[in-house]
Image (cartoon, grey):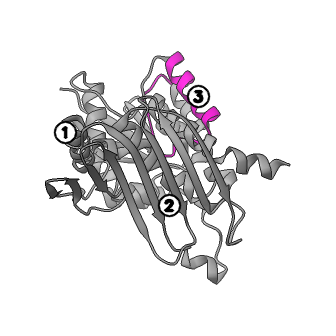
Amino acid sequence: MKTIRWGIIGCGDVTEVKSGPGLQKAAHSSLVSVMRRNGALAADYAKRHGVPKWTDDADRVINDPEVDIVYIATPPSSHLEYTLRVAAAKKPVYVEKPMARNHDECRRMVEACRTAGVPLFVAFYRRGLPRFLKVKELIDSGAIGRVRFVTVTQFQRPFASLASGAALPWRLQPEISGGGLFIDLASHTLDILDFLLGPIASATGHASNQAGLYTAEDIVTGSWQFASGVQGTGTWCFTAYASCDQNRIIGDRGEIAFSTFGGDPITLTTPEGSETFPGENPLHIQQPLIQTIVDELNGTGKCPSTGESAARTNRIMDQLLENYRTGLQQ
């Protein structure tokens, strides 16, 4: 079995625990090179994580003959650019989520990798986590019968730093992230629903900026319909008094309740009563998905999170934000 050698572009916070160690701990996988625009920080990361090579030049990672696949862990504004460059080098791509700032950028990324004949994977790592595989098992086994509809409720307090006048986080700068926290966080929920219930055919939504703390949307409500006919509704608010993270999948024989971001138990409720299932997440939360990528590159498995599946999530987010974005342009 070949050891898949990884290079990282953008070894920032997300790579410290969630992903970087997973590249080293997955079977037949090794992290050999990291890049950050600040060379001193790249060197520090390499030293702390035992990575043999570091650089401040992305092309040195992309064109390194000892790098088999490139992980793009930068903010979304550079995902398209780096994906095109890695595809041109005929190397597989693993890109952070959200895949890009909008569906058009995603489409160009998919086409570039298809033309180059290389796979494109996206870090919607919940598709590889045991808790969501358990939810899928319950649905597929008929535990709640035929699925009828889905509800999503997610809200949280605004960032404390906004009150202190600190610099605006990049996740709240649309030119970098594509929007507000909706793009960053709702993408996880919409993608896992795609994984659990199949593609969403269409969506419509309303968004606004209620609190005026930044220019991006801070609340989004919407409805959608899956290709299967299952319907869904959701509300995401990022300036509420407290936090809530709840997804409910309701069928004609019961329902499943679970969170997107927590590790709390999954609850199955039927007329016979309720049952819970453990929902703890691994320390290096991307490692299970990383293992599926390594296995696919070695011809022994298949990664469930691709450019095509991730682009669908961006398409639905675009539809949910369409009215808001149109209003800003008028």
Disc 2 target residue: 40
> At 20% from the left edge and 39% from the top edge, which residue is drawn?
137
How crowded pointer 2 is (Cα within 10 Å; few <14, some 14-19, many 20+) is rated as few
Amino acid identity at mark 2: Ala
Is residue 93 one of those drawn in magenta? yes
> At 47% from the left edge and 76% from the top edge, which residue is drawn?
242
Is residue 254 one of those drawn in magenta? no
Image quadrant where residue 167 sits = bottom right
Q: Which residues are magenta?
A: 89-115
Q: Position of residue 241 (x, y in %)?
A: 51, 78
Q: Is residue 113 above or below residue 151?
A: above
Disc 1 target residue: 27
| Dot label at residue 107 | 3
User: 5 left or right of 316?
Assistant: left
Image quadrant where residue 253 sits = top left
Q: Position of residue 199 (x, y in %)?
A: 44, 32
In terms of secondary structure, where does tag 3 sit?
helix
Q: Position of residue 326 (x, y in %)?
A: 77, 46
